[in-house]
Amino acid sequence: MKSLIPWKNRQENAAPSLWADDWFNRAWSNPFSLLAAPFSGIDFPKQPSVDVSEDKKSVTVRAELPGMNEKEIDLTWHEGILRIRGEKKHEREEKKRGRVYNECSYGYVARDIPIGDRVDWSAAKAIYKHGVLTVKLPKTEKSRETIQITVN
């Protein structure tokens, strides 16, 4: 299945299911392209591990973002999708005995999580502690109702 989303804008616009379909199609159409991907110069963001749980009152999203601080994390909501982005920049220079030691590390993570409109986005709360981002999204009153459907 071909995607209608342009290559350069996929990460920002594509649903996660489209990525899996596209990867599978590319693997079958040209299996050697996957081997060349690390050398192609295209830098895709990593996807952090995410745990989504739900109870009667709220939806909780936990994402692993080690090595970052609160200022490097960007949370947005658009049309029922929670977008988590983070960028880590670390540079260190050490001078000892006439030698200069430089170390730098950069990393970018992004993940889109479809939640829908069953939560109150304006009352969302996020806490970042020990490398784990926890986002609490309280459910709306309408989504808390349980409706029994009878089967004939």
Image (spheres, grey):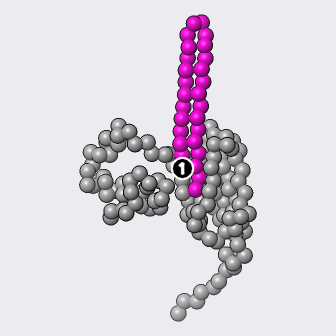
> How far across and how far down the image is residue 82, in percent?
59, 59
Query: Which is nearer the eye, 137 or 89?
Result: 89
Q: Is residue 37 left or right of residue 57?
A: left
Q: Is residue 18 left or right of residue 129?
A: left
> How far across and how far down the image is residue 75, in percent?
63, 53
Res. 22 visible in picture: yes
Q: Quadrant of residue 117?
A: bottom right
> How far across and how far down the image is residue 66, in percent?
61, 40
Quick one: SS at disc 1?
strand
Res. 52 visible in picture: no
Q: Is residue 28 left or right of residue 23?
A: left
Query: Which is nearer the eye, 129 or 12?
Result: 12
Kindly identify the residue that appears in the image at 63 percent across and 85 percent down.
Answer: 148
Q: Determine whether 124 is above or below 41 in the image.
A: below
Q: Give the residue pinned by disc 1.
A: 110
Q: Determine whether 144 is above or below 86 in the image.
A: below
Crowdedness near tag 1: few (<14), some (14–19) or many (≥20) residues, C-alpha within 10 Å: some
Kindly identify the residue that appears in the image at 36 percent across and 62 percent down.
Answer: 3
Q: Quadrant of residue 57?
A: bottom right
Of the 4 image quadrants, the one containing the N terminus is bottom left
Q: Which residues are magenta?
A: 83-109
Q: Determine whether 137 is above or below 90 in the image.
A: below
> How far across and how far down the image is residue 139, in percent?
70, 69
Kindly identify the residue that appears in the image at 37 percent across and 63 percent down.
Answer: 4
Tell me the chief SS of the magenta region.
strand
49 magenta-colored: no
Q: Is residue 57 left or right of residue 80?
A: right
Query: Which is nearer the eye, 92 or 4?
Result: 4
Query: Which is nearer the eye, 141 or 14?
Result: 14
Furthest residue in direction top, as rendered: 97
Q: Quadrant of residue 125?
A: bottom right
Q: Amino acid at mark 1?
A: Ala
